[in-house]
Amino acid sequence: MSIFSEYKYLIRKSPAVRTVTAIAFILLAAFLLKVFSTNVIRKPVIASVDPQIGYPGDEMTIRGSGFGTSKDSSYVEIAGSRVTSSAYKVWRDDEIRLVLPSNVQDGLVIVGTSSGRSDPAFFANEAGIPVAVRMDPGTSIPSIVSVSVESAVIGQTITLNGSHFGNARGSSEVYFSAAADESHSPAASDQNGEKNDAWIAASETNFDYVAWSDSEIQVRVPDGATTGSVYIQTERGSSGSKKLGISFPAGKKQYANKRTYVIQTCADISNHVATQESTILLYIPKPQISSFQPSAELNEVFPDPFIVDDMYNIIHKKQLNEIVNNKQRFSQTYVVSSYCIRSSVNPKGITYYKNRNSPVFQRFTTPDMCVQSDSQLVKDFLESIDTAEKNPYLFARSVYDYFIANFKINEKIRSGDAVFTDLIRRKKGDAYDFAILYAAVLRAKGIPCIPCGGILVHNKSTVTPHWWVEIYFENYGWLPVDPALGAGLEFEPFITIDNRTEFYFGNLDNQHVAFSRGFRQIKQSQENSRIVYRPRTYALQSIWEESGDATSSYSSLWNNPIIQGIY
């Protein structure tokens, strides 16, 4: 008889053996259950982040599940940067507490463990984005007591002294009288009931805000300001205005012939294939605010966006498996105002840059992914056309004249592996080539230049992607230049232009709508995500779409902006 047969015989004949066997099976099952439950892979899940808007040094609490009972090699990532080990105060399976680092940026919060990465939550650095400031309930309406100067020039830093400005700027703005011929102020009248004719806010993208405290503001006079007044707008109300003269030693710009456009942007996502739940992020560009485009109001958006108050994009976030009928349209409608710019420049008033440490000079003379001004091809080209001209304005004009005389314009936008430096060799290129090469040459020369991406409005039903530049001169501001239109790109302006080559150096029609001023470098929300970059389109940015690594495929269709009305 075998051992197994003998054991079965004992079980039948002996109650004690049966009892011991049953207990052994129970203990074995409990052990296996414990081992299995301990080793189950649980992807971390973030239920909440508190605070969602905060400052460096604040304590952040992340609640959820699957974080693990100890940190070990796990981590928290904010805006693409992992929080260092010394910042963690508590790490439990359902709660993490940490101190926000001094360099924390706006972005997505992710918990990573050996089991995977969580879906992201969002955090914003309150000191660095235009969100409402947490204010003392006792704070009253702001009041300007004095302005440091009676008269200033464009780009000059002035100091406003007073009270109740708020300890941080947040969404507050400083407004100056504007050179535009119509009002586009958010306030109908100032504290004293004085009627506001036209106002322009200091620009964050132009680095106009220098310092902000409850009793003192240092701000640069923005491009597009003129002699008149200055006042402060906070969430508690607007201050009374103070007089401020603006002088124009280098010349002046006039803003006239206002046009208002109703513009829709949209993208379609369809035919997705995902092995599991997968998220897609869409970064849809917003029309940008500037002196010639002072207003861009979001009128309608569908579906509800993930982030609406980003300066540059409407950000949509969607689980692909939640898309009904395998197709989803993401659309936004804006009401955008645009002015015609006519410039009068005194070249003798424009000198080489005295403040080369200013943010504008540093940012807009530095090469980036779009304007590769450090390219050897660009440097060699600059050397081949360089002259002894020291005046930045006259040098910029000489380069413009060289482009018009030596390069031909392509009506059709190039595609494929086209690069802007092809214009040097081919002597022919599209509007993108003209604008980016022109910007690169000026930056290589040490002249701040910013490429603009947007659309040309031909009529109510036709628009085309387009690119041009703005050049910054001290004591003057930004000068628009459109090399492609100057070179003869086919276009029918609403107003008659006798000499287009002459007009488009320093002047601009009101049919340009800008969706980007400069190149926007967007950080990936996850390391392993898949991104889509759309070259030679109506905005200049590094990411348009981002999908999770579980997505096998999907289709996207981006349409050019649509004009729904012109007023």
Image (cartoon, helix red, strand yellow):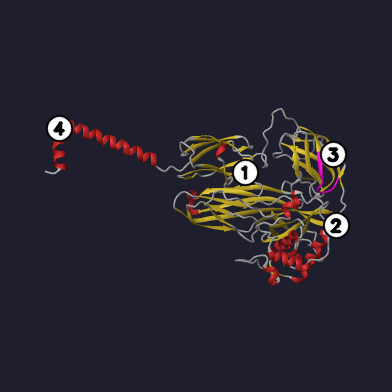
Instruction: Pick the quarter of the image with the N terminus.
Output: top left
Determine contact: label 2, label 4, CB under 8 Å. Answer: no
> Earlier along the polypeptide chain: callout 4 or callout 1?
4
- Give the amino acid at mark 3: Ser
Mark whose residue sits in front, 1 or 2: 1
Q: Is residue 33 left or right of residue 17?
A: right
- Say if 369 sits above or below 185 in the image: below
Q: Residue furthest top?
A: 138
Q: Is residue 293 left or right of residue 304?
A: right
Along the line of sight, which residue is nearer the eye, 101 or 462?
Answer: 101
> Earlier along the polypeptide chain: callout 4 or callout 3?
4
The residue at which mark 2 appears reads as 344
Q: Secondary structure at mark 4?
A: loop
- The stretch in magenta equals 152-159
The residue at which mark 1 appears reads as 106
The residue at which mark 4 appears reads as 14
Residues under labels 1 and 2: Cα distance? Answer: 41 Å
